[in-house]
Image: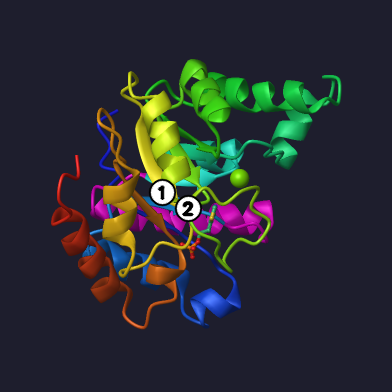
Amino acid sequence: MPVDLSLYLVTDSTPAILKGRDLCTVVEEALKGGVTVVQYRDKKSDTGDLIKTAKKLHQITQKYGVPLLINDRVDVALAVGAEGVHLGQDDMSMFHMFWIRDFPAETDTLKIADFELAKKLLPQDAIIGISTSSIEEAKKAIADGADYLGIGTMFATPTKTNTKSTIGTAGTQAILTAISDSSVGTVSIGGINHSNVQRVLYQSRSPKKALDGVAIVSAIVAAEDPKASAEEFARLIKSTPAFA
Ligand code: TZP
Ligand code: MG
């Protein structure tokens, strides 16, 4: 799974972030600016609309040779042939509920079922990323076979207010240190912008493992010029000292 996680775009269709613009146009601009992965994250649309938009996004990402990952929804990823999924610690889509309805309704069982089902149902080369905010969650995701970890929340952000914990660069560094024997990919998420991206990458690094990239929502999607914003991120990431 040689996926370049360095500039990872996460979409958001809420009006305050998209500002009435067309999501596909914004994503294409960001791709022109150098985004290396796109995650389609949409908590509001129904399944039909999710599939319609994911299909359009996939046509665009394919033009740029960039993987498209679907947040939460293995069924949508399968429907459009996306390259993978991103799952949270307690994601429960309708699809998952359908498949595991006979399991005891116990959080731990559901968490395991989520990842195992994704692994079982997606093609073998699919990319599966897991959100983690602690050493325990990171180690568990690696043991399960995650391809990469979303590590966060880095900084508090208005884009997602129901986050469990804000871990900063020190918390991220502790996780990277604890998993430094693993080759799993890592991206930081939450409140990352042009002013702090180099600090995020530099201060989070541990002697044996650094972040592979940063995941960005509003600093690209809500930017006046998403292409220019992505270009600036790419430039800053490339010029971060000691960035692995
Ligand atoms: N998960 C943790 S923070 C976050 C997600 C999806 C949102 C990050 O958004 P932004 O606008 O880049 O701070
Ligand atoms: Mg999720």
The image quadrant where one finds the C terminus is top left
Give the crowd class for mark 1: few <14, some 14-19, many >=20 residues within 10 Å: many
Task: Verify whether residue 52 appears in magenta.
Answer: yes
Q: Name the residue type under label 1.
A: Thr
Q: Which of the four quarters of the rendered structure image does ligand 2 lie in?
A: top right
**Can residue 16 be seen at all in this image of the molecule?**
yes
Give the main secondary structure of the magenta stretch: helix
Q: Position of residue 176 (x, y in %)?
A: 38, 32
Residue behind label 2 places its C-beta within 8 angstroms of ligand 1: yes
Q: Position of residue 90 (x, y in %)?
A: 69, 37
- Between residues 76 and 119, which one lies in front from this camera angle? 119
- Circle 1: element type: helix
The image quadrant where one finds the N terminus is top left
- Name the residue located 36 percent from the left edge and 27 percent from the top edge: 184
**Label 1–label 2 contact, CB within 8 A:** yes
Residue 111: which quarter of the image?
Answer: top right
Q: Is 209 rendered above or below residue 43?
A: above
Task: Verify whether residue 123 appears in magenta.
Answer: no
**Can residue 7 be seen at all in this image of the molecule?**
no
- Between residues 73 and 196, which one lies in front from this camera angle? 196
Q: Position of residue 190 (x, y in %)?
A: 48, 57
Q: Position of residue 164 (x, y in %)?
A: 65, 48
Relative placement, left or right, of 50 versus 175 is: right
Q: Earlier in the sequence, mark 1 or mark 2?
A: 2
- Between residues 211 and 50, which one lies in front from this camera angle? 211
| Residue under numbered circle 1 | 169
Q: Which span is picked out in magenta?
A: 42-67
- Name the residue located 47 percent from the left edge and 42 percent from the top edge: 171
Res 154 label? 2
Relative placement, left or right, of 67 versus 235 is: right
Relative placement, left or right, of 180 versus 159 is: left
Q: CA distance from mark 1 to mark 2?
A: 7 Å
